[in-house]
Image (cartoon, rainbow, N blue to C red):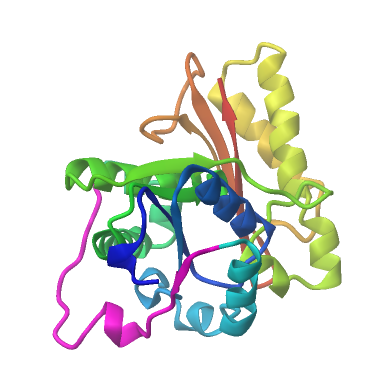
């Protein structure tokens, strides 16, 4: 099936491959709401600040295509790097304030790479909707801001995080965890839920909520905390008090593997 002749609406699921149940859920949502479902598989070098991180990112295109076929995807686009960034490519899409804190501060240049490749994919596919997981909440916000500002008509659909039975958010990076690290990793979800409970019990001090996340993470010796955040849900600016919708988020390393997770409040 050629994309130009495909029935509309088109639902797009952009991925970096090594597909898991979280990606399957995005595909299922896209299929339910679209006449044509497109999955892109592209490990984007421009969003990796560390060459070693790019090199060790898991890849298995044949396996990924099998998963897409099983999920009823109509088209898979898995281009080589020089097709997305041809010789002479010299443009960067840089989103403003929403991309600066949290992951933007921890991984300089990361969101420039994300926004640039997603803008290209949006222009190539011209889907009515694109589907992303809530686990990468800041990424969703950055892409939504970009689409609004650049008048890209593709609607950004955020879908719930899919988790393992013990609460760990599904991620392609989980494959790098040792058995001991994997056993320890659910502490992220446990710390977030414990902090949500404190908020539900009436705590509104953002410092107290951040402290509760740190306290929960400190119970796990293998957890090396990069950041904890209690931020405004719309702007991702750190809060003093939680008087409206907010986002709890954290980034933690287990050995060489970096995991993120979040929990919306309100």
Left or right for 111, reference 193: left
Left or right for 133, reference 166: left
Residue 258, how many percent across, how many down?
A: 61, 63
Q: Is residue 72 above or below residue 227?
A: below
Q: Is-magenta flag for residue 95?
A: yes
Residue at position x 45%, y 47% in the image: 34
> Where on the picture, by quarter, is residue 259?
bottom right
Residue 182, how many percent across, how many down?
A: 80, 63
Q: Is-magenta flag for residue 234?
A: no
- Dominant secondary-structure state across the stretch colored magenta: loop
The quarter in which the N terminus is drawn is bottom left
Residue nearest the observer in this picture, 209 or 248: 248
Residue at position x 40%, y 74% in the image: 44
Residue at position x 74%, y 51% in the image: 168
Magenta span of residues? 73-96
Residue nearest the observer in this picture, 93 or 237: 93
């Amino acid at each position: 099936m050629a994309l130009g002749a495909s029935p509309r609406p088109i639902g797009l699921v952009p991925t970096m491959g090594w597909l898991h149940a979280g990606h399957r859920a995005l595909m299922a949502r896209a299929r339910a709401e679209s006449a044509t479902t497109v999955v892109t598989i592209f490990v984007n070098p421009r969003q990796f600040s560390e060459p070693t991180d790019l090199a060790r990112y898991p890849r298995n295109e044949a396996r990924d295509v099998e998963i897409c076929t099983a999920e009823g995807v109509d088209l898979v686009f898995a281009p080589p790097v020089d097709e997305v960034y041809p010789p002479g490519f010299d443009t960067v899409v840089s989103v403003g304030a929403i991309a600066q804190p949290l992951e933007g501060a921890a991984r300089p240049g990361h969101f420039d790479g994300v926004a640039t490749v997603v803008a290209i994919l949006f222009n190539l596919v011209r889907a009515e909707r694109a589907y992303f997981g809530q686990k990468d909440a800041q990424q969703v916000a950055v892409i939504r801001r970009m689409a609004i500002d650049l008048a890209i008509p593709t609607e950004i659909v955020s879908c719930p995080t899919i988790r393992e039975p013990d609460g760990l958010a599904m991620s392609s990076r989980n494959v790098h965890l040792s058995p001991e690290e994997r056993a320890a990793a659910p502490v992220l979800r446990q710390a977030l839920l414990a902090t949500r409970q404190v908020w539900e019990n009436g705590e509104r001090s953002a410092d107290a909520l951040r402290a509760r996340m740190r306290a929960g993470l400190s119970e796990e010796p293998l957890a090396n905390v990069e950041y904890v955040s209690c931020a405004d849900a719309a702007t991702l600016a750190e809060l003093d008090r939680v008087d409206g919708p907010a986002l709890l988020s954290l980034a933690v390393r287990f050995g060489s593997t970096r995991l993120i997770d979040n929990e919306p409040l309100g």
